[in-house]
Amino acid sequence: MTLSSRKKIRVLVVDDSAYNRRAITEMLESAGEIAVVATASDGEEGLKQAIALKPDVITLDLEMPRMNGFTFLRLLMARAPIPVIVISGYARRADVFKAMELGAIDFVAKPQRHFSPEAATVRSELIAKIGAVRLLKPEALARQERGGDEGPPRVVVVGASTGGPPALQRLLSALPGDLSLCIAIAQHMPPRFTKAFAERLDRVSAFEVVEAKAGDELAQGRALVAPGGHTMRIVQTGSVLRCALAESGPAQKYAPSIDALFESAAAAAGARAVGILLTGMGSDGRDGMLRLRHADALTIAESEESAVIFGMPKEAIDAGGVAKVLSLEAIIGELIRLGRARS
């Protein structure tokens, strides 16, 4: 089906700046497949328009008078869940991920408060993300309609080395506990340290975080930390995924082994898996990321922007095993999006 023969995507633009509303409208309507059905200057007006018009997607500014974007999202998702793409300045990254926790499906960053001629470079990104709503809309609605027909949780495997503990604490503390995710972590750490590390993560996370024991089940809302000095693998027993542990031998360079965890996730979970390689030195995780990608899993490497040491992510990127390179904050946003989407 060609774009011209498909129904246009109906968009509501919510922004307190008249200049921005006009600029966004012109950007979107320059694409033949999009129609801006209304604009609103604040969240209160936007909520009324959203309920009355039921657009396919909403673009949202977060800083607005009367009702800001966060309140708008809370009320919208409770009353009439509609996919929302946040348009935000680079300086307010934390606000973007708060908005995604509240239900926004994606965001586009603009260089400054008001659109300028240079900001027209965001046009193609914004149009592409709105175009993707044809696929994303049912997943966005699933955030409000979680039920028994939901698929199994995504299996997220995370590897980290130097700089990993604070990165993992930031990641685990930012994830809401209702996400359809189960997590397995391989952090290079000596024996007897990982139990205390897991307990520390558990105190700051909405997930249940524990040091893994042989046979532990990977369950939604749970994160398993590989014990120091052991290699953790994911195995399937019937319809359940569990962890298997083996003591690492003296010849094994890395313990826990990120490669072993990732490779086992590729075999046991396939396309349901998400591989995330965070900060660290060396090449552990490189081969595992390749295996995951060949199994159609999503593979994400932490960017140089946020990684304390870019060694492991760079090795995996250079080997061709990485689908997305994201900052730690963006990884959090991606996991929130994935965890709120039906499998």
Image: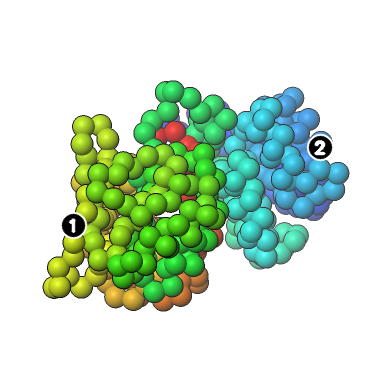
Q: Position of residue 298 (x, y in %)?
A: 35, 50
Q: How many marks?
A: 2
Residue behind mark 1: 246
Above or below for 77 versus 69: above
Above or below for 149 versus 211: above
Mark 2 and mark 1 in contact (Cβ < 8 Å)?
no
**Local secondary structure at mark 2:** helix
The quarter of the picture where the C terminus appears is: top left
Kindly identify the amino acid type of the residue bearing the numbered disc 1.
Answer: Ala
Label 1 crowd bin: few (<14), some (14–19), many (20+), radius 10 Å? few
- Of circles 1 and 2, the one toward us is 1
Q: Position of residue 153 (x, y in %)?
A: 39, 38
Q: Position of residue 207 (x, y in %)?
A: 48, 47
Q: Which residue lies at the image location 75% right of the left edge and 61% below the top edge?
A: 113
Residue behind mark 2: 44
Q: Quadrant of residue 150?
A: top left
Left or right: 131 as drawn, with respect to 98 = left
Q: Which residue lies at the image location 69% right of the left edge and 40% below the top edge?
A: 73
Kindly identify the amino acid type of the residue bearing the numbered disc 2.
Answer: Glu
> Considering only order in the chain, which callout, 2 or 1, is on the residue closer to the N terminus?
2
